Amino acid sequence: MKNKIKCVELRTVDGKVILVLYLYEKEIILEDNPKTNVEKSEAKEEEPKASALEEKEPIMTQAQKRYLFRILAEQGIEGDKAYQYLRDFFQVDSLKEVTKLEASKAIEHLIAEGKGDKNGVPF
């Protein structure tokens, strides 16, 4: 099997390389073996069940979490204080319990709250 490799370089305006990305093309062979399919379905059953909250609504993404921490840092709340602030804000023991919808509403709220201090500029 031959692998095709593509190289992508990201450069600055003056030509300095800042990122090199290698893309490997790989062929995947799928087998239609009933025994394999049964083993896969059994393996899935052994996985722990998601909580009722996760089944209804997806949890907050890492991007949302990072954005919340960045907004708080811009307002002078960083590190453990920011984590505690968010746990209190969402009234949860862990940020893993926060849904995407709740995180989106919190982002909107914190940005609106910060606009008063920065003349309408959230960043």
Image: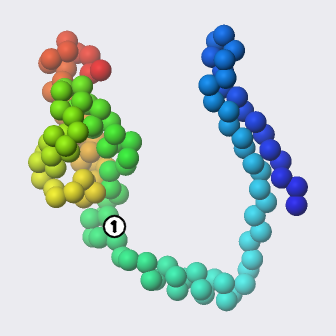
Q: Residue at x 19, y 43 (%)?
A: 80
Would you name the residue on which mark 1 appears?
55
Q: Position of residue 114 (x, y in %)?
A: 18, 24
Which image quarter holds the N terminus? bottom right
Q: Residue at x 77, y 56 (%)?
A: 26
Name the quadrant containing residue 13: top right
Considering only vertical position in the picture, is 96 above or below 30? above
In this view, the residue in front, 113 or 12, is 12
Decide if residue 90 is in sight here.
no
Q: Residue at x 27, y 38 (%)?
A: 68
Q: Position of residue 7 (x, y in %)?
A: 76, 36
Residue 36 located left or right of residue 79: right
In this view, the residue in front, 64 or 66, is 66
Name the quadrant containing residue 32: bottom right
Residue 34 located left or right of residue 83: right
Tell me how the rendering is colored: rainbow
Decide if residue 21 is in sight here.
yes
Helix, strand or loop at mark 1: helix
Name the quadrant containing residue 116: top left
Callout 1, which amino acid?
Glu
Q: Position of residue 27 (x, y in %)?
A: 79, 60
Q: Callout 1: few (<14), some (14-19), or many (20+) C-alpha neighbours within 10 Å?
A: few
Considering only vertical position in the picture, is 1 above or below 106? below
Q: Residue at x 74, y 71 (%)?
A: 30
Q: Position of residue 29 (x, y in %)?
A: 77, 68
Considering only vertical position in the picture, is 100 above or below 10? below
Which image quarter holds the C terminus? top left
Question: Number of numbered discs present?
Answer: 1
